[in-house]
């Protein structure tokens, strides 16, 4: 089964998966007097669960206008993450261990990441972020953090050739203990911006 057939084109599928994996940062940032990479990783490692709403805009070269979607995000440590899109049409994408579960138009597809080496390599590098493991993350990305506690920007640049063919850069911006945006630039020129808002009452991903 071709994973790209589950989404409207390669561009949308990779953007959606990338944003899904990075949205977890919105649940993890705690205010500190100083803000550096080690503190950010410690905050990520301490996160057990989270719930947020999102609005995502994708700029795709073959389309005349941005594609906008919105919904909710759920995270349960250490490796379960779900993106539930509510508008413009309901669908969900869940990552659990080595499986990606996609539900679209009333049909469920379960994919083993072992069957898709390129995507598996991408996810393995991201899991360093989910676990707050800076060393693991730096195996695939060059990290740089700028700004201060009230206005910080975390930039991730792929360091491996296989990743450079997919993603050019990921920029995560936040203020104090709140993530504000995730900007993804793909190697093919497409891009996306996701705005994330933590829900008033945090809850774990439903079992």
Image (cartoon, rainbow, N blue to C red):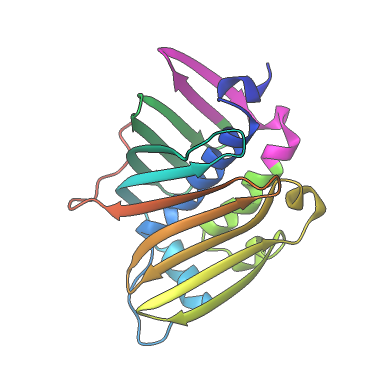
- Which image quarter is the N terminus in? top right
Pick the residue in front: 88 or 14.
Answer: 88
Pick the residue in front: 6 or 187.
Answer: 187
Q: Residue at x 57, y 63 (%)?
A: 133
Q: Residue at x 60, y 38 (%)?
A: 14
28 with respect to 146 (left or right): left
Question: Quick check: can you spot residue 36?
Answer: no
Q: Residue at x 40, y 38 (%)?
A: 68
Question: Quick check: can you spot residue 180?
Answer: yes
Q: Which residues are magenta?
A: 100-120
**85 versus 29 height, above or below:** above
- Which image quarter is the C terminus in? top left
Q: Is residue 118 magenta?
A: yes
Pick the residue in front: 128 or 57.
Answer: 57
Q: Residue furthest front?
A: 64
Pick the residue in front: 51 or 196.
Answer: 196
Q: Residue at x 64, y 25 (%)?
A: 4
């Amino acid at each position: 089964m071709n994973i790209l057939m589950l989404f409207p084109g390669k561009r949308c599928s990779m953007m959606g998966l990338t944003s899904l994996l990075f949205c977890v940062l919105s649940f993890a940032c705690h205010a500190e007097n100083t803000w550096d990479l080690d503190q950010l990783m410690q905050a990520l490692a301490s996160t057990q669960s989270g719930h947020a709403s999102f609005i995502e805009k994708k700029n795709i070269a073959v389309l005349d206008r941005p594609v906008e979607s919105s919904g909710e995000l759920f995270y349960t440590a250490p490796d379960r993450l779900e993106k539930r899109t509510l508008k413009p049409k309901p669908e969900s994408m869940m990552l659990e261990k080595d499986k990606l579960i996609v539900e679209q138009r009333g049909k469920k597809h379960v994919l083993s990441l072992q069957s898709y080496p390129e995507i598996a390599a991408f996810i393995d590098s991201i899991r360093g972020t989910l676990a707050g493991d800076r060393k693991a993350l730096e195996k695939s990305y060059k990290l740089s953090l700028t700004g201060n506690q009230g206005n910080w920007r975390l930039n991730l640049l792929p360091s491996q050739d296989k990743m450079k063919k997919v993603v050019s850069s990921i920029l995560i911006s936040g203020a104090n203990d709140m993530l504000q945006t995730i900007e993804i630039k793909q190697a093919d020129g497409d891009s996306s911006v996701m705005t994330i808002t933590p829900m008033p009452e945090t809850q774990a991903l439903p079992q």
